[in-house]
Amino acid sequence: MPHIDSYYAATQAVSCDFEPLTTHIEADVCVVGGGLAGLTTARELLRLGKSVVLLEGNKVGFGASGRNGGFVSDGYAEDVLNLEKKLGVEHAKALFNISREGTKYVRQNIEGFAADGQDPQYHWLGVVRHDVGDKLEKSVEKLTTVYGADYAYWSTDQVRQHLKSNRYFQALEDRSAFHIHPLNYCVALAKDIQAGGGVIFEETQARALHKHHSHFMIETAHGSVKAGQVVLCGSAYMHDLFPKFEAAVLPVATYVVTTKVMPDKLREAISYKGCISDNRRAGDYYRLIEGGDRLLWGGRITTQKSEPKALSNLLRRDIEAIYPQLSGLEIDKAWSGLMGYCAHKMPILAELEPGIWAATATGGHGLNTTAAIGIVVAEAIAQKSDRYKLFAPFKAQWNGGPFGQVAAQMAYWGMQLQDAWDER
Ligand SMILES: Cc1cc2nc3c(=O)[nH]c(=O)nc-3n(C[C@H](O)[C@H](O)[C@H](O)COP(=O)(O)OP(=O)(O)OC[C@H]3O[C@@H](n4cnc5c(N)ncnc54)[C@H](O)[C@@H]3O)c2cc1C
């Protein structure tokens, strides 16, 4: 399938096309999935001397990686202070440092070989929607001193100088975060893999995976791959290849819109140039694009995979609820995407069976974590480190199968209720 009709597809500056697989081919490693997890894994394996074949069922960047909010920041979908409660400070610190490595990796790339079609804007403001007194300031202090995070605390007055909304209170500013054009980044990685000797096939769904003596056979519609090891990076888009693992990854949809050009009204309402999001369990995330002429706004999560017909109106109303002064704004593009979540909100980075690895389920915090797990899984396969063991507590847990979707949707409604309660 081609890329969906998103703002990113409409403004794609670099493109690439790879032929489907129509023959038999061999490699040290076969990577399944051409999103940022699969692309980073493939690139890092090549750098460590492995031969790699990457299979993508649609186009490179077709999944969440080519249509997300574009915010790159340290951490995981799970809060680092929750990790600390579960694992202790040293383990949580080691995991946080790996997430920071992912952020740095993306930054170096988009400032280097992947700079085409990027206009990175730096910093991220995480605002709260109810007055939390000095609680946030204390968290910021801890995260800076204990974890070395580059965070600053903003008072309500400071926030409202930059975001003209009375819905917002205090904020945390992450000065290591930035935002990118994710589809251009996917394509740049794919081209770099090709230049480094990796082989990519598009429109090539991996349909079956069998163990044959000391190697694996991956079957596609018109060809096959023989590989010593396999890495599963299909996230929420993977189905029927390795079912017992797929049941652990819950597909969660989220929505994004871009507005038509409205520079004056927008710049008056929002003068912060970095990313902005709120602290609700299913909050809004947004940023100015094209130098402040337009707004890219994402929000809501649901387990329903279909796009609601009234997606544009839904998000337009969300924007106007925060910034009533933007009422009458027009939506240009609206789209949805699927994120792969595991119940523990951490990525799955594990050897599921000897020779079959998973590096996936990065949830809504995937732009740095796909890079982080790509680096770490490649090191594990090339036997350069055993850092993947840090992720051992986060097993591929069953999400409840068909009931998992219902449970997750109910949990989501519960989260919305809690959000509303906090605000009241
Ligand atoms: C709308 C939206 C907004 C988001 N915003 C942000 C954000 O601002 N910041 C952030 O950090 N994170 C964000 N995320 C999350 C982030 O985008 C994801 O965590 C990340 O991109 C996941 O990358 P991935 O490579 O694991 O999966 P994907 O990008 O989904 O890629 C999986 C790929 O595997 C392919 N595939 C699946 N099965 C097979 C098979 N059997 N054979 C061949 N190919 C297969 C699919 O076609 C797909 O291309 C957002 C997600 C969405 C959906």
Image (spheres, rainbow, N blue to C red):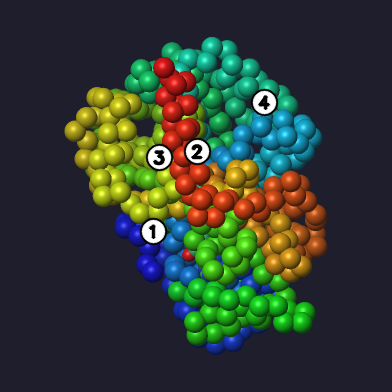
Q: CA distance from mark 3 to mark 2?
A: 13 Å
Q: CA distance from mark 3 to mark 4?
A: 29 Å
Q: Nearer the viewer, mark 2 or mark 1?
A: 2
At label 2, counting other C-alpha atoms closer than 10 Å, the crowd grade (few under 14, some 14-19, many 20 or more) is: few
At label 3, counting other C-alpha atoms closer than 10 Å, the crowd grade (few under 14, some 14-19, many 20 or more) is: some
> Which of the marked residues, 3 or 4, is nearer the chain's N terminus?
4
Q: CA distance from mark 1 to mark 3?
A: 28 Å
Number of the label disc, if any, that sits on residue 13: 1
- Seen at 47% across and 20% down, the residue is 422
Q: Nearer the viewer, mark 3 or mark 2?
A: 2
* Viewer-side residue, 361 vs 277: 361
Under circle 2, the secondary element is: helix
Q: Which residue is mark 3?
A: 300
Number of the label disc, if any, that sits on residue 411: 2
| Three-letter code, disc 4 | Thr
Q: Is residue 106 visible?
A: no
Residue 63, compared with residue 200, is above or below; it is above
Q: Nearer the viewer, mark 4 or mark 1?
A: 4
